[in-house]
Structures are given as C-alpha cells and as structure tokens.
Image (cartoon, rainbow, N blue to C red):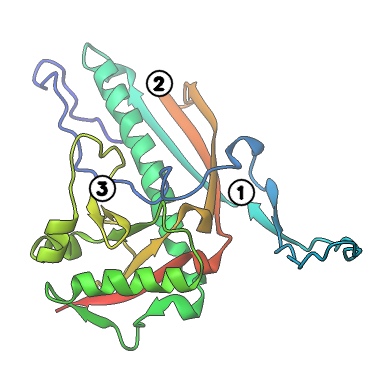
C-alpha cells in the first residue's frame, strides 16, 4: 500500500471506502460450519463420518427379529488446504493524526479481501455437483429471461426434491441480472417479502421454496454461462481459522507493518445437495 503522498495537513480525516461485494457463500445458513473448532494449522484434516441408511423390517409377534446389521460408514475428509495472507505497512513519516484511521481502514480492507477470496473458492465447488442435478451446460446454456426465470427456480427445486433434500433451509444464489429479471416477474414479486427479519447478507426475498440471495461472486465463464447454485447447508461444509496476525517493524524501513494469515477449507460432502443452472442472459 503506497502512501507516498500521505500529507496529513492536506488529506481529509475521512477515508473513502472501497466498493465491496456482498459476501454470501461462506455465511451460516448457506454452508454449514460444524467443524470450525477442529482446525488450527495448514494441512489439518477433519474426518467426517456419514452413517448409511438403517434397514427397517416388519415385526411379527412371538418371532425373533433379525441379527443386528453392521452400519456402513462413508468417511470423507475436509482438508485445510487454502492459505491467504496480507502484509502492509505505514511509514513513520505518515503517522500523524491520520495514521490510526489509515491502519483501521487497511485492516478492514484486508479482512474483506480474505473473506472475498474464500467466498469465491466456496462458490467454485459447484463443479462437484451430481450430474443429474444440472440444468444446461457450458455447451448448451439456458437462456433466461423475465418470463421463464421463475420456472427455472421451480425446476431446480424439483431436482432437489428428487434427491430427497429437505425443503426447510433451502437457498439459491443468483447474479444481480437474474435478480433484476425476478423483480419483473409477478410470480416472484407476489411470492417474496423482505423486511426487518432479513438478516443474511445478500438476501432479496423468498420464492419457489428458496431463500433468494444475490451475489457478484456467482461463477461464470467468459463473462457468461453463470452457474446459479441452489441447495441446502447440509450439502457442503466450511472451516476457517485466522492463524496469525502480527504487528512488526520491517528491518529496512522506518514503518509499522501488519501481516496476517487466513487458513480455510471447504468441501461438497453431498453432491446431490445442490443443483446448478448454467444460464446466459437473453
């Protein structure tokens, strides 16, 4: 972060904040964070146990029941394999009355940058979706307009129904242009209501059984072919740790510096728990 022109007597005490995206994918209610407390360093692995179905049998009076079955255990691993850092300094010459404000805003920007990188990483996990739960593809994307946009939400909901995914807690994350189309569709405007009870980042309403969220981090290829993901928090899991934040004096500078390390990992543990629509603008 270059501060060569930071002259307190001519700089405002107020700092212009950067424009920021709403971070959606990594928040509670969209992804589960059940294993958050079990990591401490890069490379940590959390083993997740998934018990298979239990057989249900018919009981007949005065008849022995069958021997106890051995439960199947489908074990999966969540690896903390993502590491991002920040490292910035403020020169001593620039540490007049404006310095605390610069440091505070820089820390805020650093925290946002780390979270944004994690948000985009989580969104990229859509590639593991069960192929049966997809509508459209990169080769043949669906063309979405204001007249059919709600129908696609219903179609995604049906795919999740067929996969036996719970209806309570479902969400769908759309890019701003799809939200714009939804606002022009009477089925959406009549179905949704947003008010003081909306607390998640990016929430714009409810429709077709989904909490609808909008995000600039919706994956896309070549500026098109947007990957609109619908799903349930049970489908994927995320764990993170701010491993270290250090204030220090660079050896070759008269400056204060701060560096920090963010460790995290995410996994799509139930590929059938999400459904993906590949969509182009009309």
As drawn, is 75 to the left or to the right of 200?
right
Q: Position of residue 31 (x, y in %)?
A: 46, 50
Mark 2 vs mark 1: give the one in front.
1
Task: Count neighbours of disc 1 (C-alpha within 10 A) and say few if under 14, some if 14 to 19, many if 20 or more.
Answer: many
Asked whether disc 3 touches disc 1, contact meaning CB atoms under 8 Å apart, the reply is no
- Name the one closer to the observer, 6 or 156: 156
Position of the N terminus, as image quadrant, is: top left
Q: Which residue is mark 1?
A: 80
The residue closer to the viewer here, 224 or 207, is: 207
| Distance from Cα at disc 3 to Cα at disc 1 | 28 Å
Q: CA distance from mark 3 to mark 2?
A: 39 Å
Q: Secondary structure at mark 1?
A: loop
Q: Quadrant of the C terminus?
A: bottom left
Q: Position of residue 266 (x, y in %)?
A: 54, 53
Question: Mark 3 or mark 2: which is in front?
Answer: 3
| Residue at the image point whose x is 19% and y is 72% from the top | 149
Q: What residue is at 40 percent from the left and 21 percent from the top? A: 256
Which mark sits nearer the N-terminus, 3 or 1? 1
Element type at mark 3: strand
Image quadrant where residue 55 sits:
bottom right
Instruction: Place residue 148 in its image quadrant.
Output: bottom left
Count all numbered tags in the image, as a single digit: 3
Q: Identify residue for label 2.
A: 256
Residue where numbered disc 3 is placed: 203
């Amino acid at each position: 972060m270059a501060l060569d022109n930071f002259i307190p007597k001519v700089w405002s005490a107020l700092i212009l904040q950067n424009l920021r995206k709403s971070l959606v994918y990594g928040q509670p209610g969209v992804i589960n964070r059940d294993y958050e407390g079990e990591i401490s360093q890069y490379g940590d692995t959390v083993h997740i146990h998934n018990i298979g179905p239990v057989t249900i049998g018919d009981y007949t009076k005065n008849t022995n029941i069958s021997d106890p079955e051995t439960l199947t255990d489908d074990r999966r691993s969540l690896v903390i394999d993502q590491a991002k850092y920040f490292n910035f300094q403020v020169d001593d010459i620039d540490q007049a009355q404006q310095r605390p404000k610069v440091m505070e805003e820089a820390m805020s920007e650093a925290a946002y940058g780390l979270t944004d990188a994690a948000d985009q990483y989580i969104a990229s996990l859509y590639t593991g979706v069960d192929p049966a739960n997809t509508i459209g593809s990169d080769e043949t994307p669906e063309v979405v307009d204001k007249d059919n946009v709600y129908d696609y939400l219903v179609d995604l909901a049906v795919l999740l129904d067929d996969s036996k995914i719970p209806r309570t807690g479902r969400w769908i994350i759309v890019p701003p242009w799809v939200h714009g189309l939804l606002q022009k569709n009477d089925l959406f405007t009549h179905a949704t209501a947003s008010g003081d009870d909306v607390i998640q980042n990016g929430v714009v309403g409810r429709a077709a059984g989904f909490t609808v969220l909008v995000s600039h981090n919706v994956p896309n290829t070549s500026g098109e072919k947007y990957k609109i993901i619908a799903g349930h928090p049970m489908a994927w899991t995320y764990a993170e740790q701010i491993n270290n934040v250090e204030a220090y004096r660079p050896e070759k500078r008269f400056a204060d510096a701060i560096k920090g390390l963010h460790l995290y990992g995410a996994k799509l543990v139930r590929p059938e728990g999400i459904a993906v629509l590949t969509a182009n603008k009309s």
